[in-house]
Image (spheres, rainbow, N blue to C red):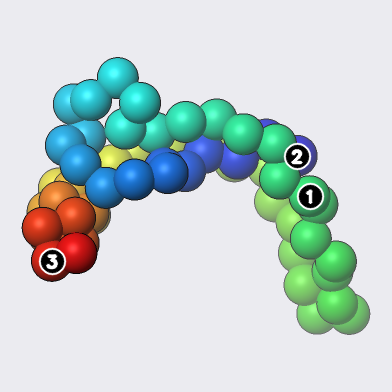
Amino acid sequence: MNAIGYNQTGPITAADALVEFEAPKPDLGARDLLVRVKGISVNPVDVKVRTRIGASR
């Protein structure tokens, strides 16, 4: 299944800030759901946390 993530921390404005990749479909338990996501957004707090993680390493 398609997924979006990042390989390294840095500014969200970078061309490779978020990359699309193929991930294995998860094994579902009796009480799990697999949903289709039709839209995403980047929260300003997530941008700050992501930038801060890179500075601390």
55 lies above or below 32: above
Marks 1/2 in contact by CB < 8 Å: the verdict is: yes
Determine contact: label 3, label 1, CB under 8 Å.
no
**Image point 15% across, 51% down: which residue?**
51
* Drawn side of residue 17 relative to residue 22, left or right: left
Could you say whether the residue bearing mark 1 is in a helix, strand or loop?
Answer: loop
- Kind of residue sitting beneath label 2: Met
- Which residue corresponds to the image point at 10% horizontal and 58% vertical from the top-left? 55
In the rendering, at what x and y percent does residue 48 appear? Answer: 12, 54
Instruction: For marks 3 and 1, give the one nearer the viewer.
Output: 3
Which mark is in front, 3 or 2? 3
Residue farthest along the top direction in this orientation: 15
Reading the chain from its start, which is encountered first: label 3 or label 2? 2
Give the alpha-carbon distance from disc 3 to disc 1, as whole Å: 30 Å
Residue annotated with mark 3: 56
Q: Nearer the N terminus, badge 3 or badge 1?
A: 1
**Is residue 31 found left or right of 37 in the rendered image?**
right
Residue at numbered disc 1: 24
Q: Residue at x 71, y 45 (%)?
A: 23
Q: Quadrant of the C terminus?
A: bottom left
Left or right placement of residue 49 versus residue 3 in this view: left
SS at mark 3? helix
Cα distance between the residues tagged 1 and 2: 6 Å
The answer to whether 12 is drawn above or below residue 9 in the figure is above
- Name the residue beneath numbered marker 2: 1
Within 10 Å of the Cα at label 1, are there few (<14), some (14-19), or many (20+) other Cα atoms?
few
Q: Position of residue 28 (x, y in %)?
A: 84, 69
Tell me the kind of residue under disc 3.
Answer: Ser
